[in-house]
């Protein structure tokens, strides 16, 4: 080692002395509840970083930032969530593109990178990101960075590099692959990185590591993974393991995928989890009375075929699909039923910001309305109505999920699928925890008599959502489930 290196090392060590960063939460991801935030629409903590803000433009910037999210961490901890995924925070392209609608579309969502090595000042600084991670960790909350390797933003600085042709396929140069080609086509006309070239792959991966490493984030949510060759993901895992540690969590967005589609990737271990694109549609359909209860039950059971150690993250709404509450006609009772089924199902439940307070909106751009803050003096959603009783319901179902390991780890056993009433059991042998879930999609009371676990004998059966006793456990229990409600039955 030369003298210079020794000095640099000494300075490096000196710099690390100071207030210790909060411990990373070591809870397994299978036990987490994930909350997805579009920063721009959540909370504006710092008006000084606002640029191009136009509260009237659904495709424009509305001022939300990391500082605003930090200010709401206590709320989120109170809700019970244990992990946050926020949209990409790298510098995005300036200005707007034509939305094809009657508004201009700015990069408010963060998916149109201008430069991967810098933070977008509209979202905050590197210090803000570090502070977010530390403050979240203090509350036992993990943070996921959203990472895009497939494409850059429209007209991004990368398209003007002298070697742009070597690293990108571009519409303006006529170098995009055939439309509809998942890998070499240009998704939505965006400049497509030649990720099949190892040198481009390494550059893209390395470029985004320093921010993650400095801030100490817990993992990545990986955007548009199906538009990048599988070999890229093998190299990616190898580099991430080396640079960020083999416990660094990777959640993939393979658009439209069910577990059969992502299983070959799980088999190779390149990701830890993938978004489940089936749960929303199947659950909405069942709650809306479409299809037989037994078919929905078999669907829920099939989700348990996920490869052990890997996770499907199931959601009801996101920035790319219509809001679930609107999909069920704005009927909050139906939406509660869906939320109860989500929180009772295997996987990593993902809540889209504001769903828990009945945020209004339907399809793009209305699926990215501001977080409603009611009377709180927080922009951009100040004055927007909040459904506090729905939030309270979410608190109770999340608390029940966390209190009962059977929800995160238990197997699935169908108990009754008569008519509109679904009753299933989740049982976890290691902890001895069992929950019986009853959900009634009809609007009238539904009844069923179900066999109870032998271990429940003589105990009081309680609904873990309401905390109310529903009966004494014998060999069987006669259940009455009011219309459009769910029960989480536990024994105590
Ligand atoms: Ca701001
Ligand atoms: Ca591609």
Image (cartoon, helix red, strand yellow):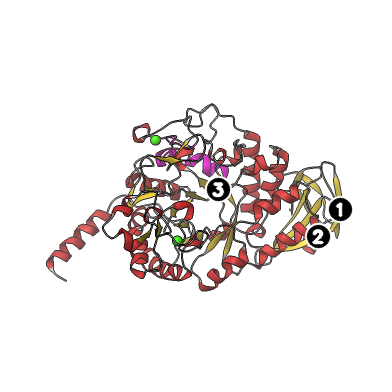
x, y (%) of residue 456? 78, 59
Element assignment for label 1: strand
Where residue 248 sits, quadrant-wise, is bottom left
Whichever of labels 1 and 3 marks the residue nearer the N terminus, that label is: 3
469 relative to 370, above or below: below
Indicate whether residue 128 is drawn in magenta: no
Looking at the picture, tell me which residue is in the foreground, 98 or 467: 98
**Residue 356 as seen in the image, left or right of residue 272:** right
* Disc sitting over residue 448 in the figure: 1
Residue 23 locus on image (x, y percent): 42, 55
Q: Determine contact: label 1, label 2, CB under 8 Å.
A: yes
Q: Which residue is mark 2?
A: 415
Q: Which residue is mark 3?
A: 320
Crowding near the residue tagged with mark 2, few <14, some 14–19, many ≥20 C-alpha atoms within 10 Å:
some
Give the camera-side residue of 151 and 18. 151
| Spatial separation of the CA atoms under disc 1 and disc 3 | 38 Å
Name the mark on residue 237. none
What is the distance, in whole Å, between disc 3 and disc 2 at their CAs? 35 Å
Ligand 1 lies in quarter: top left
């Amino acid at each position: 080692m030369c003298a210079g290196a020794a000095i640099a090392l000494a300075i490096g060590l000196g710099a690390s002395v100071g207030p210790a960063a909060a411990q990373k939460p070591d809870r397994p991801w299978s036990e987490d509840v994930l909350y997805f935030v579009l920063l721009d629409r959540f909370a504006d903590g710092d008006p000084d970083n606002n640029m191009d803000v136009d509260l009237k433009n659904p495709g424009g910037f509305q001022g939300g930032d990391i500082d605003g999210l930090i200010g709401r961490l206590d709320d989120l901890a109170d809700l019970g969530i244990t992990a946050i995924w926020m949209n990409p925070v790298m510098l995005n392209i300036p200005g707007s593109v034509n939305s094809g609608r009657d508004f201009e579309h700015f990069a408010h969502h963060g998916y149109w990178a201008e430069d991967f090595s810098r933070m977008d000042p509209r979202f905050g600084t590197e210090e803000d990101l570090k502070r977010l991670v530390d403050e979240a960790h203090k509350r036992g909350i993990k943070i996921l960075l959203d990472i895009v390797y497939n494409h850059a933003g429209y007209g991004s600085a990368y398209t003007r590099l002298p070697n742009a042709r070597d690293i990108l396929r571009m519409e303006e140069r006529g170098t995009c692959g055939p439309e509809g080609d998942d890998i070499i086509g240009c998704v939505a006309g965006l400049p497509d990185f030649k990720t099949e070239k190892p040198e481009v792959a390494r550059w893209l991966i390395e470029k985004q590591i320093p921010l993650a490493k400095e801030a100490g984030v817990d993992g990545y949510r990986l955007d548009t993974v199906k538009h990048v060759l599988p070999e890229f993901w093998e190299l990616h895992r190898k580099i991430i393991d080396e640079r960020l540690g083999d416990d660094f969590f990777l959640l993939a967005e393979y658009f439209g995928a069910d577990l059969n589609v992502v299983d070959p990737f799980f088999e190779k271990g390149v990701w830890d989890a993938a978004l489940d694109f089936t749960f929303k549609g199947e659950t909405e359909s069942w709650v809306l009375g479409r299809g037989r209860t037994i078919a929905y039950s078999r669907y829920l059971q099939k989700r348990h075929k996920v490869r052990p150690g890997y996770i499907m993250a199931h959601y009801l709404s996101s920035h790319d699909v219509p809001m679930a509450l609107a999909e069920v006609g704005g009927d909050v009772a139906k939406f509660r039923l869906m939320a109860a089924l989500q929180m009772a199902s295997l996987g990593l439940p993902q809540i889209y910001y504001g769903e828990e307070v009945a945020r209004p909106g339907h399809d793009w751009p209305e699926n990215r309305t501001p977080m409603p803050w009611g009377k709180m003096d927080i922009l951009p959603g100040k004055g927007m109505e909040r459904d506090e009783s729905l939030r309270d319901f979410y608190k109770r179902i999340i608390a029940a999920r966390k209190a009962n390991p059977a929800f995160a780890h238990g197997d699935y056993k169908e108990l009754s699928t008569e008519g509109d009433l679904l009753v299933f059991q989740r049982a976890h042998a290691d902890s001895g925890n069992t929950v019986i879930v009853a959900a009634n999609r009809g609007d009238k009371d539904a009844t069923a008599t179900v066999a109870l676990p032998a271990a429940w004998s003589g105990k009081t059966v309680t609904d873990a959502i309401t905390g109310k006793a529903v009966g004494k456990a014998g060999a069987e229990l006669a259940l009455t489930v009011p219309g459009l409600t769910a029960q989480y039955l536990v024994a105590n």
